[in-house]
């Protein structure tokens, strides 16, 4: 396959982002020019040339930390760095989303409520349900020899898992699905076209209204779902207010759905463009969990999240002052040669692999086991039933930048394997 | 005492549930928000009039300080109001505040009641009150100077006496009269820091004349703008901040204070309502005898927030 036929081509020109001086002051972590694998190449150069960079692109300017060790230090210092707000620019939610934008000790209390539900043991109990759903999805397109795997498998699976965990009744699922699609159609804070911000805003309002109703329902008829867990939870003997539960639930949609769908999209893209990986994984499925971690590291769909300095502190020789905003540049940290051997190679059995694709420290992704399970099942079933996965026309692929970079459309061709 | 109080201190409103429990989570998040809003925000004042101190139990007052301290960053001051008509109780409250992690106590007048008996005519009363607290509790103290119109304000001589007590580190001067403020600022200069306090347009003149910082109830919202304006005015950059102050912040303050209806320095209910409309907290409920907001109040607050450029 020649370079021209590939989608993932880090060597492609990246315009202004190929200019060191420009990147040092004007880096835009949402730029469309950074799609198709170029992000990591530019991030690598940032880490090497200006590991503590400044950008004037959003807010009143912000700093960017690109070395693994510097990002790690900040992750482990919630006393000096607040997680609110979690993105630059902020989503605009006036109260922090829970728990990811809250700080210890309150953060730890919220996590203590939700962690058991999202534990490996509880989540692994849902494997057969996910597998059944993935089987249905593959059944729906396998005879065609082609599909848009992003739209026909990755997004539906992530949304299905999200709604299962939220305890959304079957009758409500089309409604919530429609809201979720509007929500991630375009992220309002990023290069918003006229109209798309409005679309997101109405989706947020509709989601708020829906969760208000769902919470009322779960208070009356609790189920085995995270909303019921939150409805029955107390902090310091006080039940959570409805608004707190909503603040919790609202972020679960983009965090629990968009991110996982994105990783799975990249997963299929990399399988198609690297058939030798597909062969290895098919021959030895025990490599799949490690491969998922490596794809998380290699792609890092969430390029980084932000922090706000709470107390004056020095990191990487830079003096940060209270109120300063910064981005922990996970995409750059995950390619740091100080932390990973041959960081620009996709090595599916890489060990150790302490990547930051799911974050790090006290804010490690709440849904990490849920996401891993979804991806594992999708990988296993697809490799078991589909062969010769290929991309007929890379021009049909749509990759969307944003807080989460994601593959929106990924038309693939394949042959069905014998059952 | 080496505590140096400078910069902006929002006088923090509490959020309460419909059954009038303190919503600690809202307080936590609010202090967190204020702490990172702007470097010029140096701390918070809790348990003062905006925080409905008179309606809180002793345990609640201590808990409010503890919650704020828990989330406040290092070097972000938590100043705890100490309000009692009894000196013995004020000592206990100051000790509670210290135990909960307060950096300083904002001590209110022992004559702080609606009776307006006139502390100016009995300067020995507040002096003994402060001196007793200073002797009993190892905690920096801030003197709250009341509006002249309240009948509770201290004379300049009394203020100087209080300022000379060892633990007193600052005077929060809410006298409300520019001429009086200037006289008292000059008298206190070099003795203690002066924090200008007002919800009215006179604040600009107070800051412009001289202040080490400011305490503002309306700064629970538009905090970044308040920080820029207060800092600019103190530093003499008056042209740069004048328009923002008079065109945005004065209308906002006016919307959050209605003395004829609420009879307080700044209305707890109106401030909470502003925080609700901004989405910061979930309830504007207040404990009696304060009065919950009406629909007209909500409209007025909304317009004030719009004038400040905070709502579309």
Image: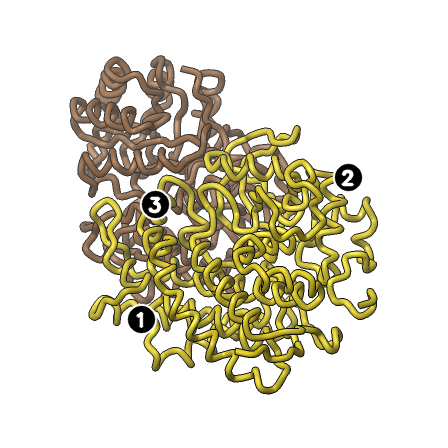
Chain colours: A yellow, B brown
Examine the rendered structure and indicate whether residue A416 appears above or below residue B90.
below
- Left or right of residue A291: residue A392: right
Image height of B30 relative to B18, above or below: above
State the residue position of label 1: A214
Locate residue A396, reporting x and y percent.
Answer: 71, 77
Foreground pick, B261 / A348: A348
User: Judging from the image, what secondary structure is the residue with disc 3 in?
Assistant: helix
Q: In which quarter of the image is residue A176?
A: bottom left
SS under mark 2: helix
Residue pictured at 42% horizontal, 81% vertical: A174
Which is more foreground, mark 3 or mark 1? 1
In the image, what residue occupies the spot 81% across and 60% down?
A: A12
Q: Distance between the residues labelled 2 and 1?
A: 50 Å
Label 3 to label 1: alpha-carbon separation: 26 Å
Residue A202 position, x and y percent, is 48, 73
Does any portion of residue A341 appear in the rendered image? yes
Front-lying residue, A37 or A322? A37
Give me the chain letter of mark 1: A
- In-front residue for pair A46/A81: A46
The chain ID associated with circle 3 is B
* Disc marking residue A92: none
From where the camera sits, is residue A310 visible? no
Q: Which of the image's four quarters has the N terminus of chain A?
A: bottom right
Are circles 3 and 1 on residues that touch, CB within 8 Å? no
Mark 2 or mark 1, earlier in chain? 2
Which circle marks residue A49 in the picture?
2
How far separated are the C-alphas under marks 2 and 3? 42 Å
Residue at the image position 21 percent from the left and 22 percent from the top? B91
Q: Locate residue B230, reporting x and y percent.
A: 53, 39
């Amino acid at each position: 396959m020649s370079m021209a036929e590939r989608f993932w081509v880090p060597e492609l020109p990246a315009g202004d982002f190929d200019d060191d001086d420009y990147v040092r002051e004007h880096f835009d972590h949402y730029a469309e020019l950074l799609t198709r694998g170029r992000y990591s190449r530019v991030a690598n150069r940032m880490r090497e040339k200006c590991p503590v960079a400044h950008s004037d692109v959003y807010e009143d300017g912000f700093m960017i930390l690109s070395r693994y060790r510097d990002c790690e230090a900040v992750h482990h210092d919630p006393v000096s760095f607040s997680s609110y707000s979690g993105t630059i620019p902020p989503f605009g939610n006036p109260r922090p989303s829970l728990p990811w934008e809250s700080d210890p000790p309150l953060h730890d209390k919220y996590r203590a409520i939700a962690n058991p539900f999202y534990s490996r043991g509880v989540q692994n109990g849902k494997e057969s349900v996910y597998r059944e759903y993935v089987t249905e999805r593959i059944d729906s397109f396998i005879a065609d020899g082609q599909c848009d795997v992003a739209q026909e498998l990755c997004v539906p699976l992530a949304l299905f898992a999200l709604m299962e965990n939220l305890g959304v009744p079957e009758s409500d699922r089309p409604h919530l699905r429609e809201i979720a699609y509007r929500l991630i159609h375009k992220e309002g804070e990023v290069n918003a076209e006229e109209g798309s911000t409005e679309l997101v805003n109405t989706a947020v309002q509709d989601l708020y209204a829906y969760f208000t109703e769902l919470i009322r329902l779960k208070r009356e008829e609790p189920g085995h779902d995270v909303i019921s867990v939150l409805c029955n939870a107390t902090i310091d003997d006080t039940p959570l207010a409805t608004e707190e539960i909503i603040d919790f639930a609202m972020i679960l949609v983009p965090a629990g759905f968009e991110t996982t769908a994105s990783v799975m999209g990249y997963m299929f893209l990399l399988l198609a463009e690297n058939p030798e990986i597909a062969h290895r994984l098919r021959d030895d499925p025990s490599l799949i969990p490690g491969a998922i971690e490596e794809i998380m590291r290699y792609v890092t769909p969430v390029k980084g999240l932000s922090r706000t300095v709470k107390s004056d502190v020095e990191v990487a020789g830079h003096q940060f002052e209270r109120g300063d905003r910064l981005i922990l540049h996970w995409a750059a940290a995950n390619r740091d040669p100080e932390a990973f051997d041959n960081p620009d190679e996709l090595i599916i059995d890489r060990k150790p692999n302490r990547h930051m694709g799911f974050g790090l420290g006290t804010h490690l992704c709440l849904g990490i086991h849920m996401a891993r399970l979804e991806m594992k099942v999708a990988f296993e079933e697809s490799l078991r039933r589909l062969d010769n996965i290929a991309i007929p026309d890379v021009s049909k692929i749509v990759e969307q930048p944003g807080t989460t970079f994601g593959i929106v459309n990924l038309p693939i061709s394949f042959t069905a394997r014998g059952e | 005492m080496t505590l140096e109080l400078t910069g902006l201190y929002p006088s923090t409103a509490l959020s309460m549930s419909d059954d009038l429990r303190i919503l600690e989570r809202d307080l936590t998040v609010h202090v967190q928000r204020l702490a990172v809003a702007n470097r010029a925000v140096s701390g918070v004042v809790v348990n003062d009039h905006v925080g409905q101190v008179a309606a809180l139990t002793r345990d609640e007052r201590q808990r409010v300080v503890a919650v704020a301290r828990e989330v406040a960053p290092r070097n972000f001051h938590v100043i705890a109001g100490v309000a009692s008509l009894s000196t013995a109780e004020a000592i206990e409250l100051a000790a509670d505040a210290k135990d909960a992690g307060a950096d300083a106590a904002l001590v209110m007048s022992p004559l702080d009641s609606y009776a307006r008996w006139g502390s100016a005519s009995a300067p020995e009363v507040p002096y003994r009150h402060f001196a007793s607290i200073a002797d009993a509790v190892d905690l920096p103290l801030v003197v709250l100077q009341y509006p002249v119109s309240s009948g509770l304000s201290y004379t300049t001589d009394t203020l100087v006496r209080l300022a000379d007590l060892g633990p007193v580190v600052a005077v929060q001067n809410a006298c409300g009269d520019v001429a009086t403020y200037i006289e008292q600022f000059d008298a206190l200069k070099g003795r203690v820091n002066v924090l200008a306090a007002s919800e009215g347009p006179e604040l600009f003149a107070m800051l412009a004349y001289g202040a080490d910082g400011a305490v503002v109830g309306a700064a629970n919202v538009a905090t970044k703008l308040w920080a820029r304006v207060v800092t600019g005015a103190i530093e003499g950059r008056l042209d740069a901040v004048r328009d923002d102050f008079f065109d945005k912040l004065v209308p906002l303050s006016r919307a959050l204070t209605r003395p004829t209806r609420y009879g307080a320095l700044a209305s707890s209910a109106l401030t909470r309502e502003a925080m609700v409309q901004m989405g910061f907290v979930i309830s504007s409920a207040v404990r009696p005898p304060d009065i919950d907001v009406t629909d007209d109040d909500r409209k007025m607050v909304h317009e004030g927030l719009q004038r400040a450029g905070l709502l579309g």
